[in-house]
Image (tube, rainbow, N blue to C red):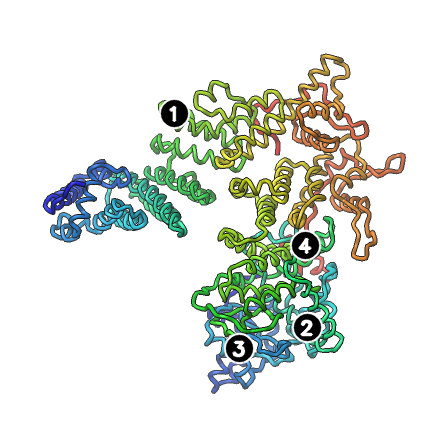
Amino acid sequence: MSPNNAADPMLKPTMLPKSLRGYVERAFGRYKDDDAKRAACEAYMKDIITEARADGTLYTRDWDSEPLFTVPDSLSISKANIQTPTHASIPNYNKSPVRRSKSRWEPLAEEKMLEKPVSASNEIGKYGSWDRKTFSGYSATKDNSLSSFRFSGPQQRTPSKSAQRPMKRQRIVNGTGLTNNDDDASSDSDKEQSLTAYYSGAMALANNPEEKKRRESRSKRFDRGQGHRPDINYFKPKNAGPANLYTRRASALMLSKSFDDSANQAVEDIDWDALTVKGTCQEIEKRFLRLTSAPDPSTVRPEDVLEKALLMVQNSQKNYLYKCDQLKSIRQDITVQRIRNQLTVKVYETHARLAMEVGDLAEYNQCQSQLQILYSEGIEGCLMEFAAYNLLCVILHSNNKKDLLTSMSRLTPEAKEDDAVKHALAVRAAVTSGNYVTFFRLYKSAPNLNTCLMDLYVEKMRYKAAVCMSKSYRPTVPISYIAQILGFSNAADENGETELSGLDECLEWLKAHGASLITDNTGEMQLDAKASSSTLYMPEPEDAVAHGDSSLAVNDFLARTT
Amino acid sequence: MAYLSMGESHRRITDYLNRFADAINYQDGDSLARLFSVSSDSPSLLSLADALNVFQDANRLIKQSEKFSQFGEVVAPFFRSLQCYRLGNLVDAYGAFEKASNAFIQEFRNWESGWALEALYVIAYEIRVLAERADRELASNGKSPEKLKGAGSFLMKVFGVLAGSCDLQGKGPKRVGALYVTCQLFKIYFKLGTVNLCRSVIRSIETARIFDFEEFPIRDKVTYMYYTGRLEVLNENFPAADQKLSYALTHCCLSKEANIRMILKYLIPVKLSIGILPKKQLLENYDLVEYNNIVEALKRGDLRLLRSALQENEDQFLRSGVYLVLEKLELQVYQRLLKKIYIIQKQKDPSKAHQVKLEVIVKALKWLEIEMDLDEVECIVAILIYKNLMKGYFAHKSKVVVLSKQDPFPKLNGKPVAS
């Protein structure tokens, strides 16, 4: 995605194609006398141009016939968008959020000028078209409850926009399918947009009496009492087994879609010294709205409400996007009120675990760094569990030997005795020596969520093992043996039925990696070691294309008739 | 401290100022250098510090005479730094010293030849040492230590000045100072753990045309090779590490035993990784006995001994950064063990010796008190073959390692194990 260029140079006449210049002139021409509208017009033009640049249609769009947008009369809508939702028990999602310009940190004055540039129906229509495309690429995720929601708004699509936003903004980096870069933050803007979809649909449901009843019974779960031990269900990843990597990949891809730099900042990086408040808000459920100025105490929840909110999230059946949003909101309320205690730790630990389960490494890393600080201040928490995660991350995710040595040397003697840490260290040794047998045995016996992190390396380890075996074994290796030692267990789906036997899964994997297979005279499938040593390969991630933009794939180009 | 009169203080300060001005006017680099070495705790500087703390208004003295005031930008903050240092306020001492150094660099740029390089070296050294102490003070007060990081930035600037100091012929006399500053930077980055920052300065030294490595002073070359060698060890680039550390070793003055020991500490693991074992005498001469058992384990194929040696000295090996390198020696130990089994089998029955049953290996490991099951051993065997430590193949059905009749256990011969 091209870097943002929201500065004025973009509107310089020399930089724009001639037809676009005409478009701009026509747009401004309508508001000759209205300065406010001209300013809003300018802001909106910048947005259009940025977007057009981003998806490469700047020079290809027919600006001459592009319809002009309207700048609405009232300025009052913008004010409402800056504030957080008011006291209604169900947040008022009727209005669609302002389509913000990319630099989120523009001073408030300018934001007031940015009136809603398009009428409400158009906004929803836009989201409608975008989210439809999201769904199509998303079917792999069992978790995807977004797809079950329809839009309550009109389905009008702005004709010019339908060509925009090719689905393949997903960035897939290396075989694991997850972004490696610690700087990639979970993008607020994208999460926000899909959440809007989620919430506006949810709103329709939320009001009917059955749902209300269900909500009540859910809240009764909180009365199980405090002290939720960590080993309750939300600990184990939904489907055990390395196969789950693919479903997790899908969600991670969705989350790591865009790299909007301004959204990189963690909730915690803002200067809160000036903004400490004591909250009075009583809502257990509250969306995340990033603060850009001093918060209104009536919108901030006090500690006891936050405890309940955390419990609500932990017990909620909703998907990660929802929980992530809620947790960020809780984190913000905590940070604003400078609460630094066991609740803080619990919140971060919860979020970290959830993030890890879905593969949202950016969010996980944010939480992990906060936790390290909190632990070092002596606040109690699951230190050992997270020390193990930290180790695994260093080993499996970066190849930095210095960091690894530092992490290992910092372990206290007590830590070295802890099971989770011992497990992580054993994984480390297995990875360093390339010992695949030990690696997959450790996978089976992994405590806590260590498997989630090991998942990042499973593909690599299997490939290394296959290559090694192809070179060392002669003449053949039984597939059943390979399946067993490389952790292809019989994976059961949610209904408890065995979907794929480990053997079949292993066969599929081997085929996908170019292995040469033969059947011996007893009918057993074998790996032809010698042949495989020259045919094995590590496949490219599915939709990667040589030049990076698969919407410009050669085949697609050749298939076009115009 | 004996009573110090105003008169005596005045005398000491003007005395220093005179020496300072003279050093510069007569381009006496060595004298100038001595005037800056705060952390050396030399009697003359300490007594000057006392004088400054008594007199309190040294600035007036500096401004009094043109001879002194032209260097006021350097001397005034230097005096402040010295005073703070004497009073034990290391954080302010560093801050003031950096200011003085900055002003010094501005002067240094304008001086033609490299006469003041010795002074520059002292300043670079002091910057690092004072920053380290300042950070210790910050840490002990619960604050975050950031002075050393700042020192790194400052020295990068100094490096830039030296690198950019070319005259019309394109080669300036000051550039030979760059390696010393580089080494100070290395020390800082290693201390901070930010060794990746070394890359840019290494690139400048090794690729910029204005630098000719052979022209640098030998002392600096040895230090440079030592640190770059250590970086290669971290990256497990053993041939390069061997080359650089060996260079440092051969060019290091034999009398500098502590330095030799430091070089050997890293060279030995590297040599072990390419199959070269040190003599026991060497380890004893330089007090590197922590490697004794490791060498023994390699000779005997004793996996248990290797593991216990690693564990016994774990902290030390982790801190110096050689732990991962030593751990990798496991494969060589396995190789030795298997070779011994092969030799024993050969003695018993030469015709069948090249076939080693997996269960025999399992038993051998059991004798070493190492419990491994068939699958695990099979995996190790596969890895050994894959990495060319054993020539042959593994027959899964019969669970037998079939070794090549010729040279089934190739020696490393100076090359690292294939990765």
Q: Are marks 3 and 1 in contact (CB under 8 Å)?
A: no
Asked whether the residues under the numbered discs 4 and 2 touch, taking CB atoms below 8 Å apart as contact, a structural biologist would say no
Q: Nearer the viewer, mark 1 or mark 4?
A: 4
**Image quadrant for the C terminus of chain B?**
top right
In depth, the one of B84 and B342 nearer the eye is B84
Task: Name the chain under label 4.
Answer: A
Q: Which residue is mark 2?
A: A128
In the image, is residue A370 above or below residue A534?
A: below
Q: Secondary structure at mark 1?
A: helix
Residue A552 point in image, percent of width and height: 66, 60
> Where's residue A302, x and y in %?
54, 69
The label nearer to you, 3 versus 4, is 4
Image quarter hosting the N terminus of chain B: top left
Q: Which residue is mark 4?
A: A235
Mark 1 residue type = Glu
Same chain, labels 1 and 4: no
Crowding at dot 3, Cα within 10 Å, few <14 / some 14-19 / many 20+, comes out as some
- The kind of residue on which mark 3 rests is Val
Q: Is residue A3 above or below residue B128?
A: below
Residue at image location 56% in from the left, 79% down from the top: A116
Q: Secondary structure at mark 4?
A: helix
The residue drawn where x is 46% and y is 27% is B264
Q: Quadrant of residue A435?
A: top right
- Which is in the foreground here, disc 3 or disc 2? 2
Q: Which residue is mark 3?
A: A24
**Residue identified by numbered label 1:** B257
SS under mark 2: helix
Going from N to C along the chain, the mark reached first, 3 or 2, is 3
Determine which quarter of the picture holds residue B34. Answer: top left
Q: Look at label 2 and name its amino acid.
A: Gly
In the displayed structure, B13 sits above or below A210; it is above
Badge 3 and badge 1 in a common chain: no
